[in-house]
Image (tube, rainbow, N blue to C red):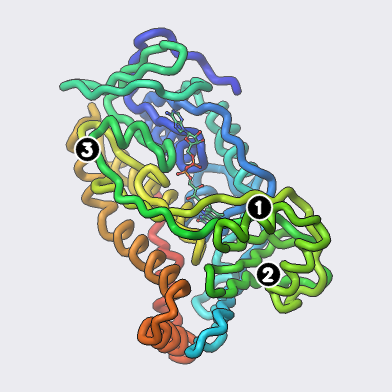
Amino acid sequence: MGGASASKSERFEVCVVGGGATGWAAALICAAAGRETAILAPPADFPLGRTAALFAGAVELLDWLGAMAELRPAAARLEAMRLIDDTGRLLRAPEVTFYASEIGLDAFGYNIVNRRLVESLSGLAQKEPKITHLEEPAAELAFGEDEARLTTRSGARIAAELVVGADGSRSLVRERAGIGMRRTRMAQSALVTTLSTDFEHRFISTEFHKAHGPFTLVPMPGSHVSLVWVERPVEATRLCQVPEEEFAEAAEEAAHSLLGPMRLTAPRVSYPLSVGLADRFAAARAVLIGEAAHVFPPIGAQGLNLGLRDVEALKDLLASRRGALGPDVAEEFHRLRQADIRSRTLAVDLLNRSLLTGMLPVQALRAIALSAAGGFAPFRRFLMHQGLAKTFREI
Ligand SMILES: Cc1cc2nc3c(=O)[nH]c(=O)nc-3n(C[C@H](O)[C@H](O)[C@H](O)COP(=O)(O)OP(=O)(O)OC[C@H]3O[C@@H](n4cnc5c(N)ncnc54)[C@H](O)[C@@H]3O)c2cc1C
């Protein structure tokens, strides 16, 4: 990738570490706030089948950044979200479908191919004169009194007033800032791919809650869906290896032929799943965003939506600051992000674990909660607003 290259010991106001979707979005909002910004972003490698369902708040942020015009034609609207209890357990919840129209929206959001999203954001950053891109990872980071000092893998040195850790779940920034992360490896892997289908998805995303995790079909343009199939790791590996036709039949069976016969349209890739929550979301001169701060299993499509809300918080914070950036900005970011991140992590973790347990009281609670979601209109609207967590504001 292009962009100006940094000379040794060059000084910036902000240095973003990591070039996933949150890193590029953060670099763009820092530049929009008038800050000289460096981004250390080695090329990201997303398999073609990986998509993210992004809800209204995230879509508005992407619109504001100028990315949605390019992304919208290749994305699919999410007009309804259907949850089906397919655990086969004694106490099962009724099927629930949430319609965006119930809360006055045309769609909850869009399903967007991750690779396209990152390409679009990095393309915008390339045109931004306040952003300097170095296509290599940060190898070292130390925090001094007046600045943070970073060294790249090739030895280039960068100083910055504030570091944005967007470097994923094994974040170097988090580690060097002395922030721990409580992390639990789940006995689950997520298999992702895309499929073409005989029947139309009608812009409805369907999440089957199965005994080993969710099996989710998310609309893509035309008669295509992306699949996120959470299974035991050994079964996910097996499903990645069986012949394509056998896999397509297994997927159709798991979907109870909801969309008819299906065919694979992308390679299958499986990801081991874990849950992780940083002890703090900022320290010294560093703020953590995206998976550097919080890691979720893919249930309810919350991970990147939450990561983009981290970016949005940073946007609001920078809009209210003039002059040098320091530890007080980091501290304020931590304060702003606490409630949203902690509540979301807890909710997603509980929902996921409630699928895995055979305990009757837990099944009963899930069934009661989903029954209420199915029938009681104010509770339905509350849940939909919670799911969207739509808080975007213009600068
Ligand atoms: C199967 C699956 C399905 C999902 N579906 C959804 C969904 O529908 N909706 C949703 O909202 N979320 C979803 N998520 C979650 C979402 O994919 C993640 O939240 C999101 O990709 C995290 O983005 P990120 O930018 O924080 O991290 P990453 O995408 O992990 O990016 C981090 C980047 O940092 C780079 N990096 C690492 N170390 C360094 C270093 N030292 N120096 C420089 N760079 C470094 C890495 O190379 C990488 O490019 C899903 C997750 C999975 C696993």
Other residues around mark 1 within 10 Å, as few (<14) / some (14–19) / many (≥20) = some
**Amino acid type, residue under disc 1 in the picture:** Arg
Q: Relative to the observer, which residue lies in front, 186 or 179?
A: 186
Which residue is under mark 1?
Answer: 72
Residue 340 image offset from top left, x and y in percent? 32, 59
**Amino acid type, residue under disc 2 in the picture:** Phe
Residue 289 image offset from top left, x and y in percent? 37, 43
Q: Relative to the observer, which residue lies in front, 147 or 197?
A: 197
Per the image, label 1 sits on a secondary structure element best described as: helix
Q: Relative to the observer, which residue lies in front, 342 or 250?
A: 250
Q: Nearer the viewer, mark 1 or mark 2?
A: 2
Residue 345 image offset from top left, x and y in percent? 36, 60
Residue at x 57% of width, y 54% of height: 52
Which residue is under mark 2?
Answer: 203
Q: Nearer the viewer, mark 3 or mark 2?
A: 3
Q: CA distance from mark 3 to mark 2?
A: 42 Å
Residue at x 51% of width, y 59% of height: 188
Residue 44 visible in this rendered orientation of the protein:
yes
Other residues around mark 3 within 10 Å, as few (<14) / some (14–19) / many (≥20) = many
- In the picture, measured across the screen, residue 153 lies left or right of residue 267, that is left
Which residue is under mark 3?
Answer: 283
Residue at x 46% of width, y 12% of height: 154
Mark 3 CB within 8 Å of ligand 1: no
C-beta proximity under 8 Å, tags 3 and 2: no
